[in-house]
Amino acid sequence: MSLTAAFNNAASGLTVALRAAGVTSSNLANALSDGYARRDISIETRRDGGAVVTGINRPVDQRILTQLRLSNATTSGLSTTVGQLTEIERLWGTSDDPASLYALTTKLETSLQSLATHQGSATRLNAVHSSAQALADKISGIAKGLQETRQDADRQISSDVKSLNGHLATIAKLNTAIVSSNGESTASMQDQRQALIDKVSKLIPIRQIARPHGSIALVTTKGQFLLDELPYEISFSTGGLITADKSVENGALDTPKVNGTTLNLPSGGRLAAFLQMRDETAPQNLQKLNSLADHLVESTYNPNAATQLFASNSLDHPAASLTVNQAQVEATYVLGGLTAETDHVFGRSGFAQHAFELSTDLSQKILLNEGALAAAQATHATLQESFGGSGVDTDTELQTLLRIEKTYAANAKALQAISGMLDDLLSIG
């Protein structure tokens, strides 16, 4: 081998080592960065000797990444649901809270039982009216809170749809930039794109489809495209002030649409969770609350009384307008209503049992969703570990950096030796 060939080999070795060191250092610096995937370099041997870096690779396990994104959607959706249900539980109050729905119904029952033994007691009659007023305020307050929960869910849907459109537009721009890169490294742009797709997967379960020249398409797990070359337009109109009678069925509330077609949302993701809360969970809880309000009005109703203990100005939604008559109803009329025949499942009294069952049902739903969330988080953590988080193992990268340092040192010594030989030849001449 000639000195020139040896010099070229050593010089190219230094260049490759420097590029490798830069890539490895970048891996270490971004080990905790969201969306960052580990890089390595491709090396080829030149015909005239030496080596050359032909490209920087960004290897990603797409199978695990797909599972991770689906897990991301599941975890995000369950977390949203648990948070919303917990807020509803806060409205109802837990069984050990003296201001809870169950505690106030129990207090009303106790005051009625006390009045029954001393019907002539003004103090005990006042206690009945006081506990009835506190319970009516609680029920109407919960009804208002449930409507606010629906209103908040509607606003969150609108906000998430806006974010989704923004993410899709940026991903489309990155697709265009990657396709037109003319051989330049696109690793950084792919990192940005991956991070944005991860954000989209929190909103809705999606799959990524490879397209030519590094471009990608996004499709929901139910087969609706969100992006393919150009982003699809996701539209949604807020429902304004949401009242108890507003629903999707009667056309008063909107659902997200893709290019004008209804978005068939898969289960999982924030969008589906907020829609379920607005259109199913909150209305169902409101209906249960209405059943308790109906129970109170019906159970204390006495046709012989000029005024009733409880009243409501809405047959369909009595909880929101439940009131206690300001004029005190006589004890005989109140107790007379409670002793009349009824086909109500809880009987004329049994308010506390009714409230207890409603609260227990809500608590059980929270527990079920919390259990599902814990399982989903465990699965997500396992997938993240398999994927390697950002794909960077810092121990491996440090070992690689040490090997690169040795390679660089060896090539530097070779150059030093060749330089010494050339100096000797020149001195002879």
Image (cartoon, rainbow, N blue to C red):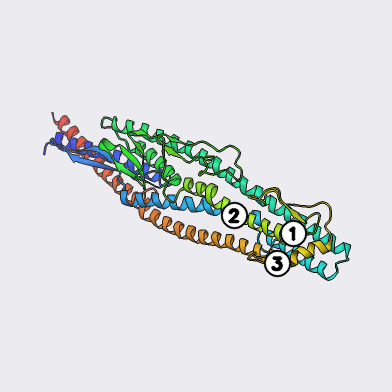
Whether label 3 touches label 1, CB < 8 Å? no
Q: Give me the disc on residue 341.
A: 3
Residue 260's image quarter? top left
Whether label 2 touches label 3, CB < 8 Å? no
| Mark closest to the chain's N terminus, 2 or 3 | 2
> SS for tag 3?
loop
Alpha-carbon span between mark 1 and mark 2: 24 Å
> SS for tag 1?
loop
Which residue is located at x 73 percent, y 54 percent? 136
| Mark closest to the chain's N terminus, 3 or 1 | 1
Alpha-carbon span between mark 3 and mark 1: 11 Å
Q: Is 280 left or right of 142, judged from the image as shown?
A: left
Q: Residue at label 1?
A: 301
- The kind of residue on which mark 2 rests is Asn
Is residue 398 in view from this perspective?
no
**Picture coordinates of residue 188 (x, y %)?**
36, 37
Q: Residue at label 2?
A: 285
Which residue is located at x 56 percent, y 63 percent? 364
- Of tags 2 and 3, which is closer to the observer? 3
- The kind of residue on which mark 1 rests is Tyr
**Picture coordinates of residue 244 (x, y %)?**
61, 46
Alpha-carbon span between mark 2 and mark 3: 28 Å
**Label 2 crowd bin: few (<14), some (14–19), many (20+), radius 10 Å:** some
Residue 383's image quarter? bottom left
Q: Quadrant of the C terminus?
A: top left
Q: Nearer the viewer, residue 111 or 364?
A: 111
**Label 1 crowd bin: few (<14), some (14–19), many (20+), radius 10 Å:** many
